[in-house]
Amino acid sequence: MISPLIAAGVLVIATVILMTVRPRAVRDIAISARAATITGAMPVTPTDEPDAAAALAASEAMGSAMIQAGYSVETVQEVLSDIARVNGLPDSQVLVFPNAVLVSARGGGQHQTGAVAGSDGQLLFSQIDEVQKTVDAARTGVMDPRSTVERIDRIRQMAPRYGPVLRVLGYACLSAALCVLLGATWAGVSLAAALGLVVGAALLVSERVPRRYGALITVAIAFFVAVVVFLLLRAGWGSGILAALLAPLVVLLPGALLTTAVLELSMGHMISGAGRAAAGGMQLILLGAGIVTAGAVVGVPDLDFSERPGLLGPVAPWIAVAVYGVAISVHRSAPPRSLGWMLLVLYVAYAAQVLGDLLVGGVLSAFIGALCVTPVTALVARQPSGPAALVSFTPAFWLLVPGALGLVSVADALGGDSAAAASLIATVTTMVAIALGVLAGSSLSNRMRRPAL
């Protein structure tokens, strides 16, 4: 009973904090954008002549950056439409895909059409935060098209706030914290930290590798982690280390991608939703193939992820949430000022899931977690020191672990497990529950006039 009491206390404290600071944080988007101190920006005025070529260039740069950051196609379309309208081109048309943007800038007798593909790699949290500031400025006319293009170029050139050693150490701590949340023993936590060092270093190296080799890197990492865990299982370390198989792979798990796919399909974006679902499914297959191959090599026939040996006490997961928040902010180079807000969102997500699991069960607890987190991230984004909603939402989402469920089901299927169908159904149900929670939460976020996802 201690954990539910802690969860209830966390939600009460979070509510008090958000209600206390909200009156000071209610700001118009344009004021927020001006406060972002964007160098060299020129405001758009009603007397300016429409420039379809400049607006098209700004839309292409912004769309490509938002896709790379991980925004949904719905949000990208809304932003690019706002940019066209504020620049005197209200008849413009925008078509967004998960990896490309097509824009037709129309108005004032002008017509310019262009397309741009999304860039490779992921943006760091500090870059995503700056992209959101630029979005706020460009869509409200605080920043003109030329300044928008220049600002996006500067954002892409931003160096990580932390060096490679700290980022790798951050990933090791991230893996250890998630291992605690997955129910490991101290041996499993230590193993997850050690594997996190190797995987974190491999991920940093892979940032410089061409995208076409991404599949090989994914399989190789999953194979290495699984071989180590399976060998130690055969050596008698006990099932308490099994969680160390999933924790170091958290960044590779496509839970957010799959849930976004369900979200977009439910909103009628059939091409983008289907594309994301296919990409997420392929990522799971690659990870599952690496794990199953490792099992075949070392002779481990079964994976029983349902067994959860004794937790490290009722307080340990709550400490692990804080460690996870600090570690992910270092590994993904979040702005230092945003750490407190990220921890607040993480604790709300975990507390909501704990209480939801107690009241309605596992699948619906994911819905409750997403429902609570989405408006909280929007409120946090409105604070003077708050990060972009996507920055605080992404780490919180990983705590809901739909990607881990999917990885287990694919591994079961590839290994010929008869229980794979039930695992796949549980994965799909969890993703749908989270997507519905995000949809319901987004309806509250939209009233706050700040794009969340």
Image (tube, grey):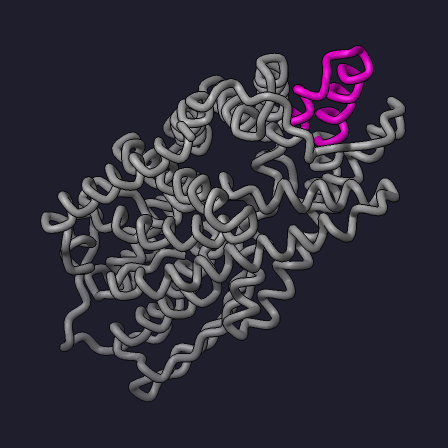
Name the residue at 31% across, 62% down.
444
Residue 312 on image: x %, y %: 52, 18
Name the residue at 40% across, 23% down.
319
Vertical comparison of 50 with 330: above or below: below
Vertical comparison of 149 with 114: above or below: above
Residue 433 on image: x %, y %: 53, 57
Residue 99: tell me if it is visible.
no
Vertical comparison of 389 with 94: above or below: above
- Residue 392 in which image quadrant: top left
**Magenta run includes residue 84:** no
In this image, 233 relative to 401: left or right?
Answer: right
Q: Give the range drawn in magenta.
A: 222-245
Count of numbered circles in the view? 0
In this image, 196 relative to 77: left or right?
Answer: right
Name the residue at 67% across, 20% down.
241
Instruction: Decide whether the magenta segment is chiefly helix, strand or loop.
Output: helix
Name the residue at 26% across, 78% down.
88
Which residue is outermost to the front?
1
In this image, 403 relative to 229: left or right?
Answer: left
Q: In which quarter of the image is the C terminus?
A: bottom left
- Pick the residue in front: 118 or 284: 284
